[in-house]
Image: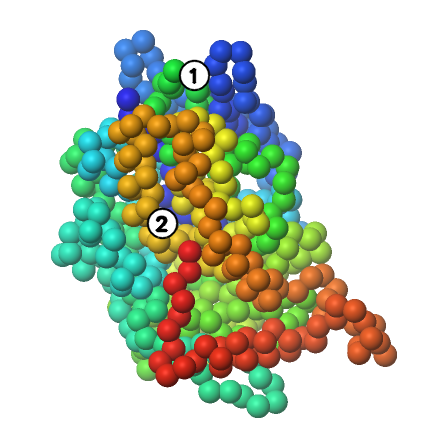
Amino acid sequence: MPTFVPSSIGGNLCPFGHDVRVTKHPGLSAHLPLRNFVGQKYPFQPLRRSESSSLQVSSPTASADVKTSKQSNDSLTSSILSDPDIEGDPIKFLRVSEAYWQACPPCDILLRGHRVSIIEKRRVEGRIQEWNVSRHELQDLVELGLVTEPELSQSIATEFNPVHIGFYDELKPQPDIVAHDVLNLGVNPRTLLGFMRARFLEQGGIIYEGAAFHTAEVYPEGVKIQQCGNVQGHWSPIVRQMRGSSRPDGMCLVVGSCATSFPAERNKSGDFMRTVTDAEDDMQLFWQAFPAQGGAARTTYMFTYADCAKQRPSLQALLDRYFELLPGYQGVPLSSLKFQRVLFGGFPCYSSSPLQPQFDRILQVGDASSSQSPLSFGGFGSMLRHLRRLTEGLDAALQQDRLSRKALILIQPYQPCLAAAWLFQRSMALQMGQSRAPRGRRGQLSGFLPPSHINRLLRANFRVMQVGTFVWPRMA
């Protein structure tokens, strides 16, 4: 029986979903009708086997309506996203992502002799914008046989050093902390996934594109699909079924872009973490920047740690602030930049992580499993850090037919490092109203933090960690 892998190759910043059920037979149904976060029920189309045992998949015939942004259509963000040269349909995706935010509640198994199928709603291919990662993390792809050394080298589009870490100080600017070999490689996702796709098909893997996963039926003695590896990301409909109405304990809101026309002399190093302002509107804004496309372009991100309070700003408001601050941050007029891609979205984080399996023969992998640090929030790098452990665990479970829920829990154990990382995440987030003290009560208000608090705290912490050459701890 094959291993079944619903995937989310396109990334998790723009959520998509469908009505999904995981059903236990006989008589016990685990079906929960799933709705998107704005109340529109997704069309239900079951995924079943025919009498000839060929896998039948069907593409969705309708999409959920989403609320449009309340922001003005003539905002700075709208004018920039209207550029036809930007990849995809960013305005449409912004509206979809906005609705989710405002209402927020493949490995080498095939090479080990297992039959694997991938179901992808769109196409199994990488995006244009590069993934940033450290070289030692990429080596697992070679050691696990997913790509060869020459293929990995061809996938690396950009390599640079050093990266800088700096925190805003209005009164006395501080020198940067300089690190080397940290997220200093830009991997071309389209090239890397192209090599991996070719190897997957050569080994007998099956890919169903333009099709959406809707239903898995679990029986006491087995399932029609032996192992369901859910790698659909944070917004996986299976994960939403498992978590129910619980809201994330934290969010990392991210906006950013990849653009050309940066001066070459300003595009030779990166920023691992930087602030250019103190906290505003109960949020501390952080920045990252990396050379891309061999130095021909530059990727910049602005992100913040927050909760899911309704008073938090919209993604469009964050994009407006991003475009307002970008020229001062990078020293380049906005009008001189040519944007190739704009991204926006949110990474949810739960204190109850990683997400424990709740069904026999179904295992969450990657962002869907919440096996990520509350600081880094998942993605390509987080998946790489768990790849070897997951590969060996799944291989053993499949060979021994140990696919019960209790057995699969052993593959996703409690990780103390994730719990400890919550302390760091909380230290970089402000609660609503925490930075706005009533006049005359600044020194008396319990819980009040001045706007400069997070910057001062991080400057002190990084000075303590800076002993000789700075070494960034490897996070889960």
Residue at left 72%, top 61%?
432
**Image location (x, y in percent) of residue 383:** 37, 50
Residue at left 47%, top 62%?
256
Observer able to see residue 377? no
Hey, what amino acid is under mark 2? His
| Relative to 9, residue 176 above or below | below
Task: Give the labeled residue for mark 2.
Answer: 386
Quadrant of the image occupied by residue 1: top left
**Image location (x, y in percent) of residue 237:** 51, 34
Hey, what amino acid is under mark 1? Pro
Label 2 packing within 10 angstroms: few (<14), some (14-19), many (20+): some
In the displayed structure, does residue 126 sit left or right of residue 145? Answer: right
Residue at left 20%, top 56%?
152
Residue at left 27%, top 66%?
158
Observer able to see residue 43? yes
In the displayed structure, does residue 342 sit left or right of residue 101? Answer: left
Task: Give the labeled residue for mark 1.
Answer: 220
| Relative to 229, residue 91 above or below | below
Sequence-wise first label, 2 or 1: 1
Quadrant of the image occupied by residue 156: bottom left
The chosen color scheme is rainbow
In the displayed structure, does residue 323 sit left or right of residue 396? Answer: right
Q: Find the residue positioned furthest to the top.
A: 51
Q: How many marks?
A: 2
Label 1 packing within 10 angstroms: few (<14), some (14-19), many (20+): few
